[in-house]
Amino acid sequence: MENRGTPSNFIKNIITEDLRSGKVKEVITRFPPEPNGYLHIGHAKAIWINFTLADEFGGRTHMRFDDTNPVKEDLEYVNSIQEDVKWLGYEWEELRFASDYFGEMYERAELLIQKGKAYVDDLSADQIRELRGTLTEPGQDSPFRSRSIEENLDLFRRMRAGEFKDGEKVLRAKIDMASPNINLRDPVIYRITHSHHHNTGDAWCIYPMYTYAHPLEDAIEGITHSLCSLEFEDQRPFYDWVVAECEMPASPHQYEFGRLNLAQTVTSKRKLKLLVDEGHVDGWDDPRMPTISGLRRRGYTPEAIRNFVFETGISKSQGLVDLQMLEHFIREDLKLTVPRTMAVLRPLKVVITNYPEGQTEWLEAENNSENEEMGSRQIPFSREIYIERDDFMENPPSKYFRLFPGNEVRLKHAYFIKCNEVIKDENGEVVELHCTYDPETKSGSGFTGRKVKGTLHWVDAGQAAPAEFRLYEPLIAEEAAETDGEVEGLEAADKPEPTFLDQLNPKSLEILHGFVEPGLKDSVPQDKYQFFRHGYFNVDSKYSEPGKPVFNLVVSLKSSYQPAKG
């Protein structure tokens, strides 16, 4: 994989100075997803930043699963995340799990208690929230904040032994309930959860909170630059507090960058899981989903995604990126590498009445007019063909250059045809056209006579392969702002029921049945094509069967998006 590096950015400048000054000897980063869902396009940026920056400076990147919440985590997600990172083209130096450090995390928690820096609280989650205060008002001390060190140690060890029920007690850091940073108002660092863990089984019934565990993991692994999205900026003081008060031998530092927000795209894993669980999509890899597996199934390539995140750069800004920018990079990646063929998605039969019955000729067609190295293919042509229903109008408006009674058009790679008769059913719907062809106008023959303004794609009716086509629009009909404050790894507070379901686009999926050239009949998943005048398509991995391909629309052919120059 070609590594383009990262553009000049503030994190690169920090690393350069840290190495120059001797503050760090080697750059070690980490990609730390929580295995509670599938990776999405936003994660692709975090992956690129961590792996590429480490590689630029001759360092290494750990793959670490922040698996501190067994209620939401699953081995399925662990496996899918590893598959996605590899597919994107990245290799980690070491594979780690937060749960590997549960023993040390527990010991550090006892250390905090012994130093008078943590206490066991009997308040419920709602009560803790009520006493926490607001951004403008200080919090209030819990009535259990003054427990003795001995009592706190005893209670915490009994929590560990499983003597209490879920939610009955928590361990809180003892910092400052009047701090202007609400994250320092005695945050919870351990809770009771009698749940089976995918990695540690039933060895534990108390689990560390993410904000406590994460800095410890970084310190244990010797991470030098803990890179995360900007939502964690207010958590950095607690990150530093944990590292210092737990007396960790290494002192990692956290740096924040602006997350990737894509227009008309929801990247909250909670919301994406709701879409899956309620059947609004057919799984995490539904081609309408912004997940890496969904993009892969739709037909996106690792190169297109990497080029996209490279172009978004690294900064502190939280801008909204146009969806067309992502689409631009997949077009650029496919336009010279995939064959250009013909497919009819909404077929209308055309009978060429003056073409000999029973005759089939084979016409030569280039595979990609912009890449001669892709060669050519032979396509059949006979008396009966299919064209797009949208390419015919019985009573067209002015400047309509496709097929209508009395008009002549060119068939791509074939001949001129002229519409002479329109056949309708009992309901008045057009079901067939009768046309004549001019044998002197064969494509490539050098014919220089009359000109036509319309060129139509088509497939031979006798030998075309039946196919299903799945056309996609954005899953969200209008802009769906990420207002729920969800951040990777942070515990969700009480939130109102999601309203984004009201913004789902009822036209996000359209399924059509038509025909493709016979050479495409045996296409296999991940085969990609440009269908003339339709767009780029990819053979679906879930619904395609041998001899019965299903094609997903990757992206249309044209866009109003203009990439930045220079």
Image: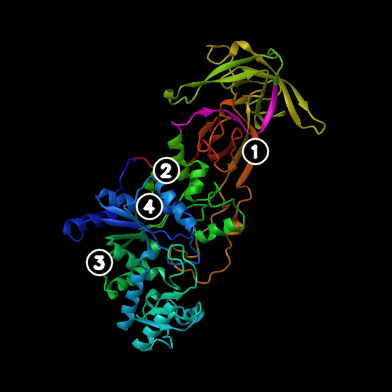
Q: Where, quadrant-wise, is the C terminus in this rendering?
A: top left
- Magenta span contains residue 79: no
Residue 449: x %, y % from top left: 57, 11
Q: Residue 250 carries which label?
A: 3
Determine the residue located farthest toward the left in the rendered image.
21
Q: Residue 297 carries which label?
A: none
Q: Residue 512 carries which label?
A: 1
Give whichever of 53, 428 is nearer the camera: 53
Q: What stretch is highlighted in magenta?
A: 335-350
Residue at numbered disc 2: 302
Res 425 quadrant in image: top right
Residue at numbered disc 4: 47
Residue 3: x %, y % from top left: 32, 43
Q: Is residue 502 left or right of residue 187?
A: right
Residue type at mark 1?
Leu
For marks 3 and 2, give the CA distance: 35 Å
Give whichever of 145, 385 is nearer the camera: 145
Total labels: the figure holds 4
Q: How is the image coloured?
A: rainbow
Give whichever of 185, 438 is nearer the camera: 185
Nearest to viewer (mark 4 / mark 3): 3
For marks 2 and 4, give the CA distance: 12 Å
Give the structural element (helix, strand or loop) at label 1. strand
Residue 29: x %, y % from top left: 31, 57
Residue type at mark 3?
Ala
Q: In this view, does 423 lie to the left or right of 498?
A: right
Q: Where, quadrant-wise, is the N terminus in this rendering?
A: top left
Give the structural element (helix, strand or loop) at label 3. loop
Name the residue: 41% across, 58% down: 33
Determine the residue located farthest toward the right in the rendered image.
426
Q: Earlier in the sequence, mark 4 or mark 3?
A: 4
